[in-house]
Image (tube, rainbow, N blue to C red):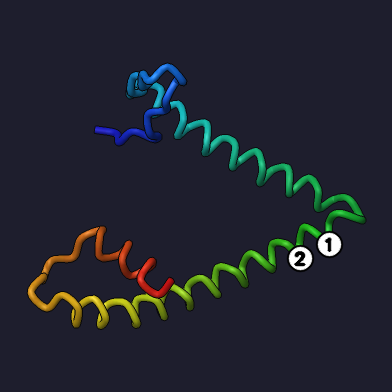
């Protein structure tokens, strides 16, 4: 079973749109991957240009630095959140998605 890729939207008349069919959800996944592939090919084509090439390489380098930073931030958040959650709710022993949401939103 494929999960739905969206929430029902209000059409303005108080009626919700019907849920998307499974074929539509699969199409959206393929469309997203196709669009990502097209963007990557476009960036590769820009590397040939003498003005855009260095800028594309700098952006790629910054994205790698951003991924490293987000990994460190995630580790710090988990190192803070898990002990905090376990001290605040000592009787709960299961790990749910609610726990991860509260790990993220609690410091803010």
Tell me the number on the disc at residue 58. 2
| Residue 11, above or below 28 | above
> Position of 71 compared to 16: left or right?
right
Residue drawn at (19%, 78%), measured in percent from left and top?
A: 88
Distance between the Cα atoms at labels 1 and 2? 6 Å
Q: Position of residue 4 (x, y in %)?
A: 33, 33
The quadrant in which residue 16 appears is top left
Q: Position of residue 25 (x, y in %)?
A: 39, 28
Front one among 27 and 21:
21
The quadrant in which residue 20 appears is top left
**Extreme residue in the left direction:** 91
Give the class, few, some or many, for how many residues have Cα within 10 Å of label 2's Cα (few <14, many ≥20): few
> Is disc 2 placed on a helix, strand or loop?
helix
| Residue 61, above or below 72 | above
Residue drawn at (84%, 62%), measured in percent from left and top?
A: 54
> Is disc 1 placed on a helix, strand or loop?
helix
Q: Position of residue 55 (x, y in %)?
A: 82, 60
Tell me the number on the disc at residue 54. 1
Q: Badges 1 and 2: C-beta atoms under 8 Å apart?
A: yes
Residue drawn at (41%, 23%), measured in percent from left and top?
A: 24
The quadrant in which residue 37 appears is top right
Q: Position of residue 57 (x, y in %)?
A: 76, 62
Quarter of the image that includes the N terminus? top left
Front one among 7 and 49:
7
Tell me the number on the disc at residue 99. none
Residue drawn at (38%, 67%), measured in percent from left and top?
A: 104
> Position of 50 compared to 29: left or right?
right
> Position of 44 compared to 32: left or right?
right
| Residue 69, above or below 12 | below
């Amino acid at each position: 079973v494929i999960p739905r890729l969206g929430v029902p939207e209000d059409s303005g008349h108080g009626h919700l749109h019907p849920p998307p069919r499974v074929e539509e959800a699969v199409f959206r996944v393929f469309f997203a991957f196709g669009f990502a592939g097209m963007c990557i090919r476009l960036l590769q084509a820009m590397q040939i240009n003498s003005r855009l090439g260095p800028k594309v390489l700098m952006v790629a380098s910054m994205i790698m630095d951003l991924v490293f930073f987000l990994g460190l931030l995630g580790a710090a958040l988990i190192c803070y959140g898990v002990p905090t959650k376990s001290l605040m709710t000592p009787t709960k022993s299961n790990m749910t998605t609610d726990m991860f949401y509260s790990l993220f939103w609690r410091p803010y």
